[in-house]
Image (cartoon, rainbow, N blue to C red):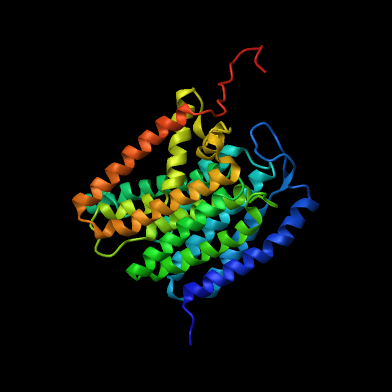
Amino acid sequence: MHLPVDLIGFSVALIASLSFTVPVRRLALRYGMVDLPGPRKVHVKPIPLLGGIAIYLAFILAILLTHREIPLQQIIGIIAGATLVATVGVLDDGGLLHHQIKLFVGMPIAAVFLIASGIRAQLFSQLWPGTIGAALDVIFTVFWVVGVTASFSILDHMDGLCAGIAAVASAFFTISAVLNGQTMVRTLGAAALGAALGFLRWNFNPAKIFMGDGGAMLLGFLMATLGLKIRPEGTPFPTNWLVPILILGVPIFDTTLVSISRARRGLLPFTSPGKDHTAHRLSNLGLGHRGAVLALYCLAVLFGTSALVLPRFSPASAYVLVAVLIVFGCVAVLFLEAVPYERQVKLQKSSSAT
């Protein structure tokens, strides 16, 4: 009996991620690659970084063993983009790069690798077939990849949060692909799920290792890629584009919340880290660290389930569901803005500023 390729990929990635994390942790400790405690951190003792290396190796190994039904050109583009964002992230973790390099150089170039391999959005080209629609799709692809990758980068602020949300999203991408006969998405999603779950064993509270930006950016890039490839069969445009948006609802919501909140206080959303994320605010409401993370897992499952049932709705009903979720999101933003959280202040340009 032949095992399904996606099951093989999941198993390989899971075992490899579980196994590789141990020596990677030792490597991080040996070379002093640790995340030190600070006023904007939730941990109180140094935690080894570089967990993203284990996630990367596990994913790549699984894909190399199961990629037979995926076009070689697209595999090369995905591996090239994943390698780039993981490398840039690790260098940023080591303080070897300016933090804006990953946002304005690493992520856009990774998106270009996908586009060159034939992976891009098919959004505007369905509205305006031809050169203009294709050009707008290329621009949107870069925006999508950068946005989703960055959202996972800033989501990595509590033990187990980023890896867990990526695992839930990967699971729903894989389920959707199984239901719609998309072999490539099944294979990629299963490998990403195994890699994230294996690392989560060591990263859930209390974490023994952090993935760092190398891991968070890698998972974000993979989720962005899956979002570009998932296409529910028989789902009309533009409803089909709501599926990846819903599956990635938690990181999209968290990024929206902190962007609005920080902009209101005169801060740049992606350059002003602090304890003002959704998980921080839920923790302050009394859920605690684990409770906040588990609550967001549940929310991710709710979003993912909505994405699976969305294609069964008529277009009008689908829009009603999305409208309800948007209203829910707006109310949630207003509510969370009113609860206690760390309010960073804008630095004053004066000689007395400290």
Residue appearing at x 68%, y 64% in the figure: 20
Q: On the rendered image, what quadrant is the C terminus found in?
A: top right
* Left or right: residue 117 compared with residue 277: left
Front in this rendered view, residue 180 or 215: 180
Q: Does the image show residue 215?
A: yes
- Can you say whether 149 is above or below 71 in the image? above
Residue 7 located left or right of residue 305: right
- Name above or below for residue 215 compared with residue 252: below
Q: Looking at the image, which residue is at 37% across and 38% down?
A: 329
Q: How many marks?
A: 0
Image x and y of residue 74, in percent: 44, 65
Q: Is residue 247 found left or right of 265 in the rendered image?
A: left
Q: Quadrant of residue 46?
A: top right
Image height check: is 277 above or below 196?
above
Q: Position of residue 155 (x, y in %)?
A: 53, 44
Residue, x 43% and y 43% (percent of image)? Answer: 252
- 296 left or right, relative to 247: right
Extreme residue in the front direction: 286
Towards the viewer: 33 or 329:
329
x and y, in percent, of residue 180 in the image: 33, 68
Q: Residue furthest bottom?
A: 1
Identified at 55% across, 36% down, the residue is 286
Residue 117 seen by the camera: no
- Furthest residue in direction right, as rendered: 30
Across and down, in percent, residue 148 comes to: 46, 47
